Image (cartoon, helix red, strand yellow):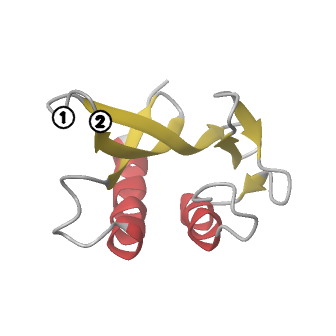
Amino acid sequence: MAFSEFEAKKIDRAATKFLQCRRPPIEIRPKLDLDVRISGQSVQIVETRPHFREPSTIIESPLAKATYVKNTRRWKIYWMRSDLKWHSYSPEPESRSIEEFFAIVNADENGCFFG
């Protein structure tokens, strides 16, 4: 089930605020950038960059994911490990709001999201 229009606007506002803080400078963005994607009940933060052998092909590398669980009204937080699987972010596996999720990712206290 997709997010309602109200929820989607709330996610968009929080994502815009996060991206304003975390995106690289404008002159670097053609070579490295961040984006936020919504899919079903999940919000993903992805890193985008051109493929090193085929610059016309863009590679997306997922960094963080939050999945909304409606019955608990919480966001489960995941990070992508080197095995290319999602793992629960053990210091703070859940957040109460999408804004809190973006704040946790932005702080990245354990170096899980941005190394």
Q: Residue sitting at 14 percent across and 31 percent down?
A: 56
Q: Position of residue 115 (x, y in %)?
A: 62, 59
Percent x, y of residue 96: 70, 60
Total numbered badges shown on the rendered structure: 2
Image quarter for residue 20? bottom left
**Foreground pick, 2 / 111:** 111
Look at the numbered disc 2 and give the secondary structure of its residue.
loop
The residue closer to the viewer here, 12 or 44, is 44
Q: Indicate which disc residue 55 carries.
A: 1
**Is 79 in front, or is 94?**
79
Residue type (three-letter) at the residue carrying disc 2: Phe
Residue marked by disc 2: 52
**Residue for point 33% across, 44% down:** 48
Q: Left or right of 4: which side holds 1?
A: right
User: Callout 1 environment at 10 Å: few (<14), some (14 to 19), or many (20+)?
Assistant: few
Task: Tell me where residue 39 appears, x and y as whole percent.
Answer: 44, 30
Picture residue at 62% right of the left edge, 39% below the top = 67
Question: In the picture provided, is 112 more to the left or to the right than 31?
Answer: right
Q: Amino acid at mark 1?
A: Pro
Numbered badge on residue 10: none
Of helix, strand and loop, which one carries label 1? loop
Q: Does 47 sit above or below residue 40?
A: below
Q: CA separation, marks 1 and 2?
A: 6 Å
Pointers 1 and 2 in contact (C-beta within 8 Å):
yes
Between residues 74 and 79, which one lies in front from this camera angle?
Answer: 79
